[in-house]
Amino acid sequence: MILSLSCFFILANAPVALCYTPPIIYVSGDGSGDFNCSGTNDQIQINQALQFISGNPGYTTVHLKGPFTYVINDTILIGSDTILEGDSSAAIKLADHAGWDTMKPLIQQKSSSGNVNITVRGFEVNVNYAGNSEITLGKGYYNVMYFTYCNNVKVCNMYMHDGTGDGLRINQGKNVQFYNNTIYKLGHDGMYAIRCDNVEAWNNRITCRTNSALRIWNSKNVKLHDNVIDSFYHWSAGGPGIRSRSRQEVPSAM
């Protein structure tokens, strides 16, 4: 009886510990979120939500609610130990004629010295090539994500399309996972890993434009498997499905 009562007491208190999910900060376009967007310069509220996560260790996740299109005209900045996720009906869209400098991405780490434990998952990114067609493809404009010196990076279950640059571009990172993504007609590589260690990409469906689906440069411990790679019949259609190089000079945008 004593043993039974002890077990009951433990189980009665277990859900608090075992089923606990760190609080989520919601961003929405219908007024129901913790931060609410209007469809113009929505990076402001998204960055406010991510800043709240950085300042409150009990929180880990910013969730973009759908159905809504979050139009951005500046970079979204994500810090360490942070998940940026969304409903599949939530989309981030680059504003028309954004006019950004080359290598300024839609999503980037918050600290220039790098961050750790970053996850981006579950939503759509429309890089809006139709609204930015003055940009030359493959020159480093409007990469969806560009992380430098970041470790433990996970990008999964994303739909990224109609871009002018890379999907995930990561430079000198460790422990990179890129999986279950659908990538359609970006303007450079689906994933481009530069001087990285321990990279794995799998279960992605990638339609190439301008360059490769998966590209590796001076990286080690890399696994690329179980991906479906195709292209289309057009002058802008992609190069090799998988591209790997080991050279000493700094890689260009191409």
Image: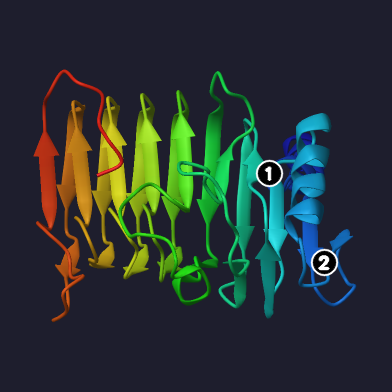
Q: Position of residue 246 (x, y in %)?
A: 11, 26
Q: Nearer the viewer, residue 240 or 32?
A: 240
Horizontal side, residue 149 vs residue 70: left or right: left
Write down the residue under mark 2: 37
- Residue 18's disc is 1
Q: Position of residue 103 (x, y in %)?
A: 46, 41
SS assignment at label 2: loop
SS assignment at label 1: helix
Q: Is residue 12 visible?
A: no
Looking at the rendering, in which quadrant would you find the C terminus?
A: top left
Q: Is residue 167 above or below residue 3?
A: below
Residue depicted at 20% across the width and 56% down the height: 211
Query: Which kind of residue does numbered mark 1 sit on?
Result: Leu
Residue depicted at 46% across the width and 44% down the height: 102
Q: Quadrant of residue 253?
A: top left
Q: Is residue 250 visible?
A: yes
Q: Is residue 221 above or below residue 130?
A: above
